[in-house]
Structure formats: C-alpha cells, structure tokens
Amino acid sequence: MWGGPRSDESRGSSMSDEPRFLSEVTVELVRQSAADSDVLWAARVSTAGEQSLEELTKDPERSKGLINFLMRDRHGSPFEHNSMTFFVSAPILVFREFQRHRVGWSYNEESGRYRELRPIFYVPGADRPLVQQGKPGRYEFHAGSDEQHKLVSEAMESSYRRAYEAYQEMLEAGVAREVARAVLPVGTYSTMYATCNARSLMHFLSLRTKDEQARVPSFPQYEIELVARRMEALWAELMPLTHAAFVANGRTAP
Ligand SMILES: Cc1cc2nc3c(=O)[nH]c(=O)nc-3n(C[C@H](O)[C@H](O)[C@H](O)COP(=O)(O)OP(=O)(O)OC[C@H]3O[C@@H](n4cnc5c(N)ncnc54)[C@H](O)[C@@H]3O)c2cc1C
C-alpha cells in the first residue's frame, strides 16, 4: 500500500484479537478482460477480412482448431492479450512460492508496515496429507493419522498464539509494526492482488498443479495447488477453448 494507512487499518493494537485458525484459501476473480476471441483476434490480425468479432465466432470448429494449433506449436503471444486480476487470501508460505513467478504477473500484497496484521493462521485440514516419503523433487505424500493431525493442530495453534502475543506485546510497548512483525510465522494469512494473462497463468498452472495429463510432471506444495486449482476453474469459465487446448496439449504453456 502506498497511500498510508486507511482508518480501519490504522487501529491501535488490540489485545482482545482472538487468533483464528483456517485450513482454506480464498481466490476471487475481481476484474477480467479475457475471452477465447481475444486469442483468435490477435492470431488473425494480419489476415485481411477477418478482423471483426462476428468473423471470429462464425465458425466455432475453425476457432477451436486455430487455438489448438497455436497451443500445440507454441505460438504463445496471442494468449497474452487478456487480463485477469485475482484477490487471493492464503498463508504467507504460499505467497513466497507464488511471487517467484515473475513473468506476466503483477502483485500487490497487504503491508505489514502500514497495518497491523490480523491473527489469522493456517492449520492443515483433515484432507491435507501429512506424511512425506520418497526422494527430493519426487516426494509422495500420504494421509496423516488422527494423532498426527492432533499434534499438528495443537503445536501450530500454541505456537501461533505465542507469536501473536509477542507481536501484540511489542506493539503495545510502542514498537513499530515493521519491527514487531518479525515474530509472525509464515503460516500467517496475507492477501494480495495478482494480475496475469492466460499465457502466464498457464505457465504457473503447469508448475503448481500435479496432474496426470501433464506432459511434464510437477510436484507442487499442496497449499499453492489449492490456489492454482481455483484460479484454473475461474479461468476455464472465461476461456473454455483455450483451457481445453491447454489440457489437451499436456498442460504446457505455449
Ligand atoms: C515443485 C517446485 C519446487 C520448487 N523448489 C524450489 C526450491 O527449492 N528453491 C527455489 O529457490 N525455488 C524453487 N522453485 C521455484 C522455481 O525455481 C521457479 O522460481 C518458479 O517455479 C517460477 O518459475 P519460472 O522462473 O519459470 O517463472 P517466471 O519467473 O514467471 O518465468 C517464466 C519464464 O520466463 C523465463 N525467464 C524468467 N526469468 C528469466 C531469467 N532471469 N533468465 C532467463 N529466462 C528467464 C523462463 O523461461 C521462465 O520459465 C520450485 C518450483 C516448483 C514448481
């Protein structure tokens, strides 16, 4: 945030803030200009007589074929003439991985300097596999036992509570937010806007989803895959032909 704190964000520290523990991530599509016709338009720009949207939608099979050809032969630039902005709420550990995606992505994340961070923390849900086996880069994950889930929940919750108390203690004593936040763990929830186009989203999806149809397998962390899968579902509704071609061509970005 650049403009200084808003009134609801500049409240003083409040010892009454009870920590909340979540297992979910949230992804909303807040703004978009993205359709299969954008791809067709860009690809056909040099072809005389085919520059109206009417022309583009006249022959659906031809449109489908063209998108598939562009995907298969990795003509990537026609997939860049569109835009999607997502609002994501997830633990900081997800954002650390997410923001490694540099090309075709823009990010703005909530500030721990301008606002007091809320006590919302990640605790894995019952579906989250807990046991890791195998070699680095090819780990397999298996369900945890009830005891392991109990241990994880209790250990995380008590650790989060202690960290947040220390954070509050420092704020109460007048320590700057940017200093006090150092004690907060990567399981703390944050929020960001992330803007991309279909090409950069496909590259992200190819790396951050594990899928049998992928030509090149990837082994992403469960939590970032939750975000990726939600983005994929929202994008597939906007650009169904492009999404289908992405899947049919091994989930590789063109
Ligand atoms: C399963 C998994 C495990 C990972 N483990 C680790 C890890 O242990 N440690 C770690 O540090 N990272 C790790 N990463 C992050 C990974 O190395 C990449 O930083 C991340 O996936 C972003 O990919 P990218 O660079 O292709 O994306 P982008 O930054 O979006 O780049 C897109 C493409 O642009 C081109 N490009 C971008 N920048 C350059 C450049 N400077 N020079 C040349 N070409 C460029 C490349 O073709 C690149 O694929 C992991 C990622 C995954 C998916």
Image: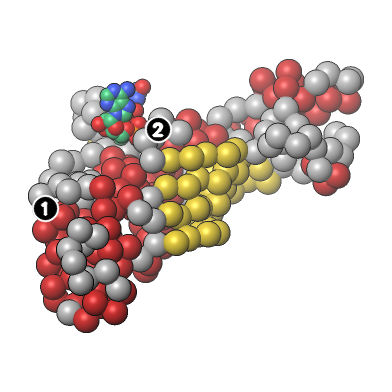
- The answer as to whether callout 2 falls within 8 Å of ligand 1 is yes
Residue 163 pos. (x, y %): 69, 26
Q: Is residue 129 left or right of residue 43?
A: right
210, 35: nearer the viewer = 35
Determine the residue positioned at 26% across, 53% down.
78
Horizontal relation, residue 154 to residue 45: left or right: right
Image mark for residue 102: 2
Q: Quadrant of residue 2?
A: top right
Q: Is residue 216 visible?
A: yes
Question: Taking 211 as reference, is 55 above or below it?
Answer: below
Picture quadrant of residue 234: bottom left
Residue depicted at 12% across the width and 67% down the height:
65
| Image position, residue 157 (x, y; %) | 63, 37
Q: CA distance from mark 2 to mark 1?
A: 24 Å
Residue type marked 1: Arg
Q: Are marks 2 and 1 in contact (CB under 8 Å)?
A: no
Label 1 sits on a secondary structure element that is helix
Q: Pick the residue in front: 163 or 64.
A: 64
**Residue under pointer 1:** 72
